[in-house]
Amino acid sequence: MNISSLSEICKTPGISGFEKPIRDLIINKIEGLVDSFEIDNIGNLVAVKKGTSGNDRKVMVAAHMDEIGYIVKHIDDSGFLRFQTIGGFDPKTLTAQRVTVHGKKGEILGVMASKPVHLMSPEERQKAIKTEDFVIDTGLPKEEVEKYVEIGDPITREGDLKQIGECVNAKSIDNRVSVYILIETLKALQSREIPYDFYATFTVQEEVGVRGARVAAQHVNPDFGISLDTTVAFDLPNTQPHEQVSALGKGPAIKIMDAMAICDTRMVGYLKTTAKGASIEWQPEILSAGGTDTTGLQLMSKYGAIAGAISIPTRHLHQVIEMANTKDIDDCVKLLTEAIANIDNHDWNP
């Protein structure tokens, strides 16, 4: 794995609706790997690598580049920031979390502040914490805060990538690991012929309703669609096997369904066959809640796309730090590379 590249991708800011910094980084990394690219009106980055068969079929792979985060909605008289969450958060994970406010004059650090346990009543200690219970403390008075921050500025979680055992651990593994995988796949395909035009698409605003993929799919109108995203790895002690969804170290997860999409059985079968042919260990994924760009690819092309997904098992999703296995990540690159290169060798009849 290129750990330094993944680290840079995870660290670069880009919450939903504010993706320009991460998009600029991706453009820098894919230059020379694709025949062309464009940015659509909503902000999706659509890169094209031309196929060699002369067939007009299109393959679209989507990896959303946005991350969950916050936005400044109020500065109080003492300089504390109130915020709106962007994307799904478990409020208990916010406690004492460091954040970066991306203001009009650069970045300033802050920390999520809430009532100390020492001052809580017994009743308060039993109550579930809410996001409204937190403010962001920058350590600055209001007059200084307002020199740097204004309403509407984006806020990201703070945390560098670390290697822990066989895993990488960072903020925004969801879904920057898929951005990394798609870039590495483009590199791997430099030495391969591909049959159909390949649209490597880095989408926006997935975390707030799969918005970018819907727009991009209408524009590209793909015949085949593959979403790249993380999935739950609840492989912790005292969990039941049926609760796990996926597990770290057991290979890429091939999505069967989630709450927003039932994957085309042809694509599921193709990805399974491709994994087996390349001796890649894989695991099936059924996710009972949540969704991915799969639904946008499947539904929004003119005639619908034969769509599925490759998912990266990830622990601690939508928490302060997320974790994925390095071999799983490498195997996702291998699986996607083989799937793109050999997609014309499969029987796609209904």
Image (spheres, rainbow, N blue to C red):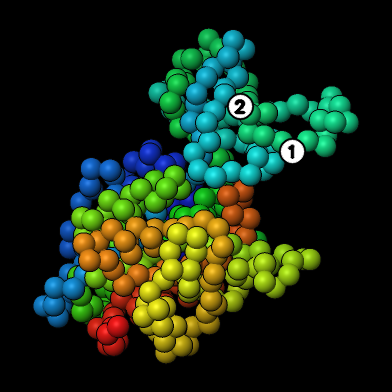
Tell me if label 2 and label 1 are in contact, CB under 8 Å. no
Disc 2 residue type (three-letter): Ile
Disc 1 residue type (three-letter): Ala
Q: Please tell me which residue is depicted at 27% across the width and 85% down the height of the picture.
A: 349
Which image quarter: residue 136? top right
Q: Residue 207: image x %, image y %? A: 45, 48
- As drawn, the label of residue 128 is 1
Which sits earlier in the primary sequence, circle 2 or circle 1?
1
Q: Which of marks 2 and 1 is in front?
A: 1
Q: Please, what secondary structure does the residue beneath circle 2 have?
A: strand
Q: Name the residue under label 2.
A: 136
Q: Residue 254: image x %, image y %? A: 48, 74
Which image quarter: residue 262? bottom left
Q: Please tell me which residue is depicted at 39% across the width and 62% down the height of the picture.
A: 294
Report the front residue among 149 and 230. Answer: 230
Q: Is residue 74 above or below residue 323?
A: above
Q: Distance between the residues labelled 2 and 1?
A: 19 Å
